Image (cartoon, rainbow, N blue to C red):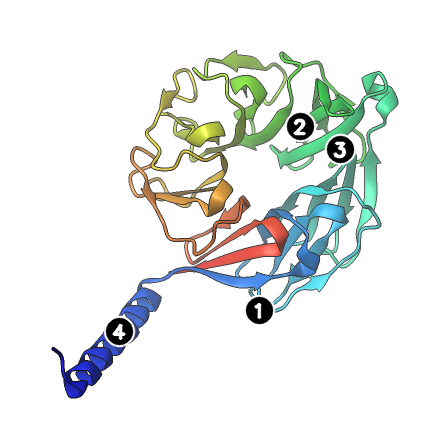
């Protein structure tokens, strides 16, 4: 039977071990909850212009920014109740926000925003447009993708281009009527779109033409990211991770340690890649996406979006959840 002194010593040793463990964990870096709140609304998008200036967007038109690396956040009302699905800046001053069927723009670093374009249901046979993703592939040329719906039913996809920096948009015909969810360009000419039904579309002529690539899955793909013209990853339903080393001519399914839906993927370098998803899942690869290790997120809440660079990372999700990664 352990005496009181031995009990005290054991408790002390356990306490010291826990303290040392916490110090080591902090020294090695990791994900920590920085803020849970922002009205309790789901956060769907995050984008940092640099180490200090960043933006998050979410349900009910919530748009907030930080100028101190996320220590404090200030709301910047857009005047819309639609959920914000994407935030994208081209440089420090020019940025865009997608909410419902509208595109909002800023040219002064986000101090002021205006609705630069609004897609109308009349352009989609009366169906309601919803924009999900925007990317530039030139100084003036950009793309948006999304879907058109009647009630809860998706009835068409949206693919539109601007050639004048967002002043005017032209709706293009697509190869699929299922929703298109995310678009990524690796340079002026080469781009990829992913969406429902395992759809992957590709262009190598700056979007003048798009062709389908065989993903090998019928599950919805939510996000795609390319490191260069050859190396790319796409993620989606039921832990789906697809990898290509030939620009998407062939896609290979990669084993995932998590079976929940994966919603965002991002290369930090040719070797380092991160994924976030439902149930608080965070995955990391150190070999360009060939193998993955699950990371401790300290949450079971859904994580909808990710932004990460060589120093810091951010993941945002349900009920205003925000995680920060520090190396």
Q: Which mark identifies residue 20? A: 4
Image coordinates of residue 320 in percent, x first then y, are 62, 55
Q: Quadrant of residue 216?
A: top left
How many residues crowd around disc 2 within 10 Å: few (fewer than 14), some, or many (20 or more)?
many
Instruction: Return the disc, 1 or 2, that comes first in the chain's sequence.
Output: 1
State the residue at coordinates (50%, 16%). Answer: 218
Contact check, label 2 and label 4, Cβ < 8 Å: no
Query: Eyeballing the image, is 59 above or below 189?
Result: below
Q: Which mark identifies residue 71? A: 1
Contact check, label 2 and label 3, Cβ < 8 Å: no
Mark 1 vs mark 3, CA separation in Å: 36 Å
Q: Quadrant of residue 254?
A: top left
Q: Which mark identifies residue 277? A: none
Instruction: Return the disc, 3 or 4, that comes first in the chain's sequence.
Output: 4
Relative to 208, is 10 on the left or the right? left
Say which residue label 3 marks: 164
Instruction: Return the disc, 2 or 4, that comes first in the chain's sequence.
Output: 4
How many residues crowd around disc 4 within 10 Å: few (fewer than 14), some, or many (20 or more)?
few
State the residue at coordinates (64%, 61%). Answer: 37
Front label number (1 vs 4)? 4
Question: Would you say residue 204 is visible in this rendering?
Answer: no
Which element type, helix, strand or loop, lies under badge 2?
A: strand
Contact check, label 3 and label 4, Cβ < 8 Å: no
Mark 1 vs mark 4, CA separation in Å: 26 Å
Which element type, helix, strand or loop, lies under badge 1?
A: loop
Which element type, helix, strand or loop, lies under badge 3?
A: loop
């Amino acid at each position: 039977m352990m005496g009181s002194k031995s009990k005290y010593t054991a408790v002390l040793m356990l306490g010291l071990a826990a303290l040392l463990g916490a110090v080591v964990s902090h020294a090695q870096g990791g994900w920590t909850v920085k803020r849970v709140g922002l009205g309790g609304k789901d956060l769907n998008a995050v984008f940092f212009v640099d180490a200090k200036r960043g933006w998050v967007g979410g349900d009910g038109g919530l748009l907030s920014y930080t100028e101190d690396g996320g220590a404090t956040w200030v709301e910047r009302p857009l005047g819309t109740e639609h959920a914000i699905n994407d935030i994208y800046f081209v440089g420090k001053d020019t940025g865009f926000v997608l909410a419902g069927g509208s595109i909002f723009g800023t040219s002064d670093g986000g101090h002021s925003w205006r609705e630069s374009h609004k897609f109308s249901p009349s352009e989609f046979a009366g169906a309601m447009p919803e924009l999900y993703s925007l990317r530039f592939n030139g100084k003036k040329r950009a793309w948006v993708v999304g879907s058109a719906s009647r009630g809860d039913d998706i009835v068409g996809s949206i693919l539109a281009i601007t050639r004048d920096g967002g002043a005017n948009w032209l709706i293009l015909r697509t190869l699929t009527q299922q929703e298109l969810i995310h678009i990524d360009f690796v340079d002026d000419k080469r781009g990829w779109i992913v969406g429902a039904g395992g759809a992957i579309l590709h262009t190598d002529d700056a979007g003048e033409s798009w062709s389908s690539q065989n993903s090998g899955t019928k599950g919805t793909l939510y996000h795609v990211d390319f490191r260069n013209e050859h190396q790319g990853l796409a993620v989606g339903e039921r832990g789906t991770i697809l990898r290509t080393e030939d620009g998407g001519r062939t896609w290979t399914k990669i084993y995932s340690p998590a079976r929940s839906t994966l919603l965002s993927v991002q290369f930090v370098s040719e070797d380092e890649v991160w994924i976030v998803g439902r149930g608080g899942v965070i995955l990391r690869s150190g070999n360009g996406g060939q193998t993955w290790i699950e990371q401790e997120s300290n949450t079971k809440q859904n994580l909808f979006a990710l932004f990460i660079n060589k120093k810091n990372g951010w993941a945002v999700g349900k009920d205003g959840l925000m995680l920060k990664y520090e190396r």
